[in-house]
Image (cartoon, grey):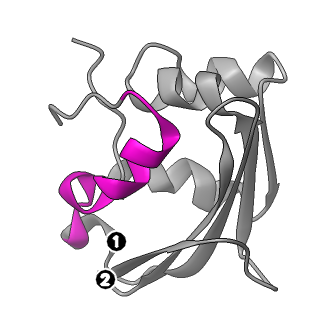
């Protein structure tokens, strides 16, 4: 995907342009994003069998929660920081359904980094 973002806000505003509905068929889940530091905030994204809805704020019962420093999250979604490496280095914390977080890369792919 060719969308490089310059902030977490920009990422969530352009999420529909990254979304691959066919890769999210059969997925029914809510991802909570808790992004801290400068430019951070809280968002939750609901997936329902190939559809997606982005919401600002928090939800009571997310399927998966992703916590990360906002500047590092921007690097990760731009393809400048690998998700696995971020997780192993403790920069990315995932709770709930961790396997679903890994699958998310198929329907919300990071930028190629180019």
Residue at the (46%, 47%) spot, across then down:
9
Res 79 → quadrant: top left
Mark 1 sits on what residue? 24
* Region rendered in magenta: 6-21
Numbered circle sitting on residue 51: 2
Res 89 → quadrant: top right
Q: In this orientation, which residue lies closer to the viewer: 76 or 5? A: 5
Residue at the (52%, 16%) spot, across then down:
81
Numbered circle sitting on residue 98: none
Per the image, label 2 sits on a secondary structure element best described as: loop
Image quarter where the N terminus lies is top left
> Against 52, is 64 above or below?
above
Image quarter where the C terminus lies is top left
Res 36 → quadrant: top right
Per the image, label 1 sits on a secondary structure element best described as: helix
Q: In the visual, does 80 lie left or right of 94?
A: left
Measured as percent of width and height from the top left, residue 47 is found at 45, 79
Furthest residue to the front?
38
Circles 1 and 2 in contact, beta carbons < 8 Å: yes
| Camera-side mark, 1 or 2 | 2
> Against 74, is 52 above or below?
below
Let me know if residue 9 is in the magenta part.
yes
Q: In the visual, does 45 lie left or right of 92?
A: left
């Amino acid at each position: 995907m060719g969308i490089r973002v310059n902030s977490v806000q920009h990422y969530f505003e352009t999420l529909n342009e990254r979304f691959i509905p066919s890769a999210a068929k059969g997925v029914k889940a809510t991802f909570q994003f808790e992004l801290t530091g400068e430019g951070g905030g809280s968002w939750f994204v609901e997936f329902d069998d190939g559809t997606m809805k982005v919401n600002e704020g928090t939800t009571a019962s997310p399927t998966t929660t992703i916590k990360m420093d906002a500047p590092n999250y921007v690097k990760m979604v731009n393809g400048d920081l690998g998700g696995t490496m971020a997780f192993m280095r403790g920069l990315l914390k995932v709770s709930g359904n961790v396997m679903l977080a890994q699958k998310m890369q198929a329907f919300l792919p990071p930028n190629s980094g180019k």
